[in-house]
Image (cartoon, rainbow, N blue to C red):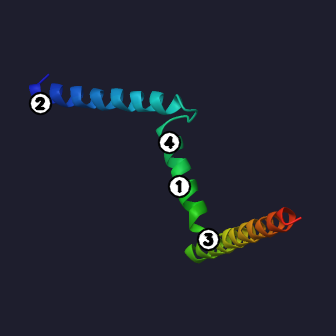
Amino acid sequence: MAPFVTQMVERALAVARFRQELDERIASVGIAGVEDVLELSDRLRSGLDRVLPDEIDQAQAQLDRVRDGFTHLGDELQHLKTVKLELTSER
């Protein structure tokens, strides 16, 4: 074979070996190979496309309100504890 053809065959074989190695690495975490990675990526992208950024913002705002409510409740309980301790120590 001509040196150019030999070089191209070697490169193609190197790519094939790399692809095999990628498939093996990916398979080690329970995914069948590159095709499955691409399919999972498409499915993930499709699923995320169904969630609007405004929905995420609204959920975050709700969580912030809940957190603030619990913080306020914690402050109120601490105040109640302080008052109770003062009243019981005056006896």
At mark 1, the secondary structure is: helix
At mark 4, the secondary structure is helix
- For the N terminus, the image quarter is top left
Query: SS for tag 2?
Result: helix
User: Relative to 84, does residue 13 appear above or below in the rendering?
Assistant: above
Residue 72: x and y in percent read 71, 72
* Residue at numbered disc 2: 4
Front residue of 82 and 5: 82
Q: Tag 3: residue type?
A: Gln
Find residue 32 and report its image quarter: top right
- Disc 4 designates what residue? 35
Q: Amino acid at mark 4?
A: Glu
Q: CB of mark 1 within 8 Å of CB of mark 2?
A: no
Q: Is residue 88 left or right of residue 61?
A: right
Of pointers 2 and 4, the one earlier in the residue sequence:
2
Q: Quadrant of residue 7?
A: top left
Q: Amino acid at mark 2?
A: Phe
**Residue placed at 34% from the left, 30% from the top?**
18
* SS at badge 3: helix
Q: Amino acid at mark 1?
A: Asp
Mark 4, residues whose alpha carbon is within 10 Å: few (<14), some, or many (≥20)? Answer: few
Please report whichever mark, 4 or 3, sits nearer to the chain's N-terminal start.
Answer: 4
* Mark closest to the chain's N terminus, 3 or 2: 2
Badge number at residue 65:
none
Residue highlighted by disc 1: 42
Q: Nearer the viewer, mark 1 or mark 2?
A: 1
